[in-house]
Image (spheres, grey):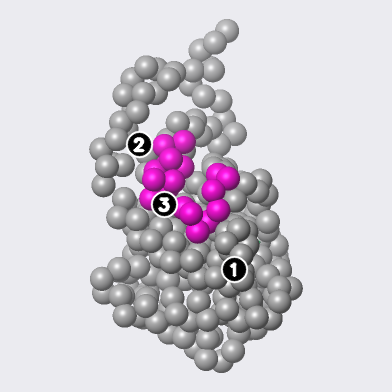
Amino acid sequence: MSLLKTIFKNKKSNQNTPLCIPKHIAFIMDGNGRWAKRRSMPREYGHSKGAEVFRRVIRYCGDIGVEHITVYAFSTENWKRPESEVNAIMKLLSNFMDEAFADLEKEKVRVVFLGSKAPFSDELREKMEKLEKDSSIYKRILNVAFNYGGRDEIVNACNELIADGVTNVTSELIDSKLYTCLSPDPDLIVRTAGEYRISNFLLWQSAYSEFYFTDKLWPDITSEDVDKAIASYSRRERRFGAVSPSTETVK
Ligand code: FPP
């Protein structure tokens, strides 16, 4: 775990500053299709490699002390893809859950699915619900956004508040009804494959998130790339709309 021991120079103060491990990292795992195409392979092959990398990355993030991880695995718009590709991703989800059940005591992570489970087969939905229930004793959280859309999430939260009879909506009330209500807002959002878009991901929660983009395709991502994202994050000054102490002293 070289990352935790790594110290880098803070350019501003010229002091040694330790890396800052984000409490919550979210990943937009993009580029599986292009990765496969470059190898003249079907897109499903890219997703299968992407699923392996997903497992490696979440394990690494857990090892270095990230308490909340969110991955964008299937959006509300991804249903528009060819049936064979959609079926392949459903199968990968099912395989992931089988492994997660087997490794529950070793991994000690609470799995939460973000999104409505209504469109899934009974078998898949029951497996998702069982995994959420069986893993709910653990503190560390893995949010798997599956059939997820940020707008859908906000609309769903509002409808739940209306159903509860709420007449005065607050930020905190919306927070409490989001699919991510067990996690703090993401500190860092990583998007791969050279795209600079949010793509309907964590629209509410990303208000003050830091973003890290890399041209590397998701199946090529390694723990060193996670280190680079965290090193970049550690150099950022997060002001949350306020001014920095150094700015205040400048007349
Ligand atoms: C985006 O790449 C990726 C997806 C829509 C699917 C992500 C799925 C996985 C990483 C594997 C499954 C994970 C779980 C948890 C089951 P893209 O297909 O849009 O790539 P492209 O932009 O190169 O076409």
The residue beneath circle 3 is 222
Query: Does residue 54 appear to the left or right of 20 in the view shown?
Result: right
x and y, in percent, of residue 1 in the image: 26, 47
Marks 1 and 2, how far apart at CA: 39 Å
Secondary-structure class at tag 3: loop
The C terminus lies in quadrant: top right
Residue carrying label 2: 19
Name the amino acid type tagged 2.
Answer: Leu
Whether pointer 1 and pointer 3 mark residues with C-beta atoms closer than 8 Å, the reply is no
- Residue depth check, mark 2 versus mark 3: number of the one nearer the observer: 3
Q: Main secondary structure of the magenta part?
A: helix
The residue to which callout 1 is attached is 41
Mark whose residue sits in front, 1 or 3: 1
Residue drawn at 30 percent across, 69 percent down: 108
Sequence order check, earlier mark of 1 and 3: 1
Q: Is mark 1 within 8 Å of ligand 1?
A: no
Residue 69 location (% of width, % of height): 44, 58
3D distance between C-alphas at marks 1 and 3: 21 Å
Q: Is residue 117 left or right of residue 221?
A: right
Q: Image check: 12 left or right of 79?
A: left
Give, as a three-letter code, the residue at label 3.
Thr
Question: Does the image show residue 164?
Answer: no
Residue count near mark 2 (Cα–Cα under 10 Å), binned few <14, some 14–19, many ≥20: some
Please report the bounds of the magenta region as a residue range.
214-232
Instruction: Look at label 1 and name its amino acid.
Output: Met
SS at mark 1?
Answer: loop
Q: Which mark is residue 138?
A: none
Mark 2 or mark 1, which is nearer the start of the sequence? 2
Image height check: is 169 above or below 64? below
